[in-house]
Amino acid sequence: MTLEDAEVKRLVIDLLKTPSERDRQTKVGASQISNPCDYCLANALKGGPSAPNRWWLGARIGTAIHATLEVEEDKHVDRPRSYHFDALAGAKIEEKITLGVITGYGVISSKPDLALVKHEHLLDYKTTTKDKLKKYKLFGVPVSYVYQTQLYAWGLNKQGINIRRVSLVFICRDGSTDDDIWVYSFDYDEDSAISAWERLEGIWNYLQDGGKVSELDSHADCFTCSLTGRAA
């Protein structure tokens, strides 16, 4: 018996919506810690439910792009197959690092996309759209991306993998040419990472002292809170 079109569509959607390892992550990592929304960070610390997101497909395409890059990078770590990939020699790809320990919560870890060890350079891939990329070029990249990667670099440095430079690599999901990939780089700044970590500790201590998640403010630009009507 053949399938109806609706059944075929449902099958593909269910396959694409199969939770990834990152989806199953139960503890916060660098991406949650760097979220400027106090409400969302506290909710994540408490293990609260995520807001439903009907715009899920872009994230899944982003996961596929990350997976493709990881497979290709891995071919050159032990011995680059071409001089084009010499920078990948000895690289650390999606390796779990420890950011720190929060008393009463546990070890917090993350997986940076790519650490080019011999160049002391961290790369983090961000998939986006061409419209958003135009805004980033004009008005600057989201501060949360900077703090997220500073936390990665902080964790790597603490583990003896020196990082001095960080690059955000933006890849347009709706792109078609080389021009739809853009790199934004900056120096590692330990103080930025420490400030993000101290904010995390502050929110955790607030919760441990009996503070309620619902009494924390949402960030004005929080997309997740906008889905629930909570954002100002």
Image (cartoon, rainbow, N blue to C red):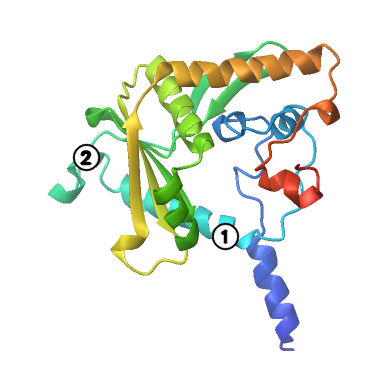
> Does residue 159 appear in this view?
no
Q: Height in image: 124 above or below 55?
A: above
> Does residue 53 appear in this view?
yes
Q: Which mark, by number, is residue 150? A: none
Q: Nearer the viewer, residue 34 or 28?
A: 34
Q: Quadrant of residue 167?
A: top left
Q: Residues within 10 Å of mark 2 (few under 14, many from 20)?
A: some
- Type of amino acid at the residue the image marks with label 2: Ala
Question: Disc 1 on helix, strand or loop?
Answer: helix
Q: Residue at x 85, y 30 (%)?
A: 214
Q: Nearer the viewer, residue 103 or 222?
A: 222
Q: Residue at x 65, y 45 (%)?
A: 23
Q: Nearer the viewer, residue 81 or 143?
A: 143
Q: Position of residue 41 (x, y in %)?
A: 69, 30
CB under 8 Å between callouts 1 and 2?
Answer: no
Question: Disc 2 on helix, strand or loop?
Answer: helix
Residue found at the far bottom of this picture: 1
Q: Residue at x 25, y 45 (%)?
A: 76
Give the labeled residue for mark 2: 87
Q: Height in image: 13 above or below 78?
A: below
Q: Position of residue 89 (x, y in %)?
A: 23, 37
The nearer-to-camera label among 1 and 2 is: 1
- Type of amino acid at the residue the image marks with label 1: Gly
Q: Position of residue 182 (x, y in %)?
A: 34, 52
Give the labeled residue for mark 1: 58
